[in-house]
Structure formats: structure tokens, C-alpha cells
Image (spheres, helix red, strand yellow):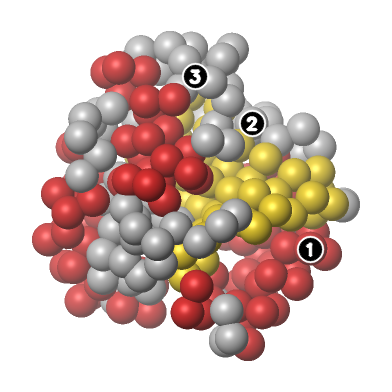
Amino acid sequence: MRSEPAAARGGDSHGNASSGWPEFLRAWLRNPARVGAVWPSSPRLSAKLARIAPGHGAPVVVELGPGTGAVTTQVSRRLPPEGRHLAVELDPGMARYLQERHPGVEVVNGDARKLGALLAERDITSVDAVISGLPWSLFDRVMQQEILDQVVGAVGETGAFATFAYSHTLPMPSARRFKATLHDTFDEVVMTRTVWRNLPPAFCFLCRRPRR
């Protein structure tokens, strides 16, 4: 399956995080434990996450928890015309909003814990990059591991995984556990510098070469 050219996939061409704020807030009010934030990622943080997506060839890139599309915009700008871009969003309202804003992206209203099955349904056998906007610090150990296992199965030995965390969550036991789990799961885990122009400030984890 070929997707639309990258220029047609862009949706919000300005990458303005505030443009999706009303829908983001509605999703947070529906289930604050699922959303984990009350403001979309800033263009600067989104661009840093999107850099892990290949900019040449025919890559397959998957977003987990794309929300209202702050990162989606940046990924769409980066992907070449032959690229394929899936966005897996659990909240049905945000999934509808995202599809309207990004008609060229394959938006899937589904659960990241079923990523392997969602990819198989679309005849995707390997993924070049998985980019996550999921609130890891709100997940228990079992859920964190379930999702990471799905990510590892998708990216294999050659793909990459990127996610972010808010700087203020680092002292939380669940955040420390997630960081340790990343190091147990991937041979290469890079923590970027803090992106201060984000609400709240955040940093990225860039991961490659799964250990299993």
C-alpha cells in the first residue's frame, strides 16, 4: 500500500500544539489517567521525536498515542513520498480528530498492547520506527512491559524506538522503573537534553537494538 505524498499527509502545516488543545482537554476530562497530560507536545519536542523516522526510501513509521497530532505533523513532514505512517490512538474522540486533521495518515483507533495484531491486519511485517506519546509513568510494570514487548516485535533488530518523559516525573517509582526497563530491553538507550520549551519540560529516550 502506498500512502499520499508527505506534503499531503501534513494536516496542521504549522505544527501548532495549541490548535488541538480543546480536543486534548476533552480527552483528558474523559479519562485523565489515560491521557496523562493537559497540553499537546510542543513543536520542538515533537520535532526531536520525529527525527528517528527515516527520511528516505519507503519506511514504515508507527505512532503510539499520537493524541491530536503534534508529533504526527512533524513525522509527516519528514517522511518521503513512499513512506507509510500509522497512528494508533486509544481514545476514539482524538482518533477521529486526528484523522480529520491528517487524512493521509492511517489512523487506527486501537490499543498499543495489540500492536502486533494491528500491524498483521494491515500486512505490515516490519517497522522502521515506533514513536510513542504514551504516559509511561502512569502505567504499572505489567502494562509497560506488554507495550514494550509489542514495540520490540515491531522494530526487530534494525528499527528504532523513541518516546519521551516529563522531567518532573523522574523521581516517580514508575518512571525509574520504566527507564530501567528500557535499558534491559534495548542495547542502546540515549537520553536527550531537556526540552524546556514544552509544557511541562520533557526529554526523549531514543532506543535501538533490542536485546531479545
**Residue under pointer 2:** 128
Which residue occupies 53% across, 35% down?
Answer: 51
Task: Looking at the picture, tell me which residue is in the foreground, 194 or 127.
Answer: 194
User: As drawn, is 106 to the left or to the right of 134?
Assistant: left
Element on which disc 1 rests = helix
Mark 1 residue type: His
The label shown at residue 121 is none
Earlier sequence position, callout 2 versus callout 3: 3
**Residue under pointer 1:** 183
Which residue occupies 12% across, 61% down?
Answer: 22
* Disc 2/disc 3 C-alpha distance (Å): 10 Å
Mark 3 residue type: Gly
Density class for disc 3 (Cα within 10 Å; few <14, some 14-19, many ≥20) is: many
Earlier sequence position, callout 1 versus callout 2: 2
Mark 2 residue type: Asp
Earlier sequence position, callout 1 versus callout 3: 3
* Disc 1/disc 2 C-alpha distance (Å): 20 Å
Which residue occupies 29% across, 58% down?
Answer: 40
User: As drawn, is 102 to the left or to the right of 188?
Assistant: left
Instruction: For marks 1 and 3, give the one nearer the viewer.
Output: 1
Examine the rendering and report whether any part of residue 2 can be seen.
no
**Residue under pointer 3:** 83
Which residue occupies 53% across, 20% down?
Answer: 55
Picture layout, residue 51 above or below residue 19: above
Image coordinates of residue 155 in percent, x first then y, are: 70, 39
Examine the rendering and report whether any part of residue 39 can be seen.
yes
Image coordinates of residue 163 in percent, x first then y, are: 55, 55
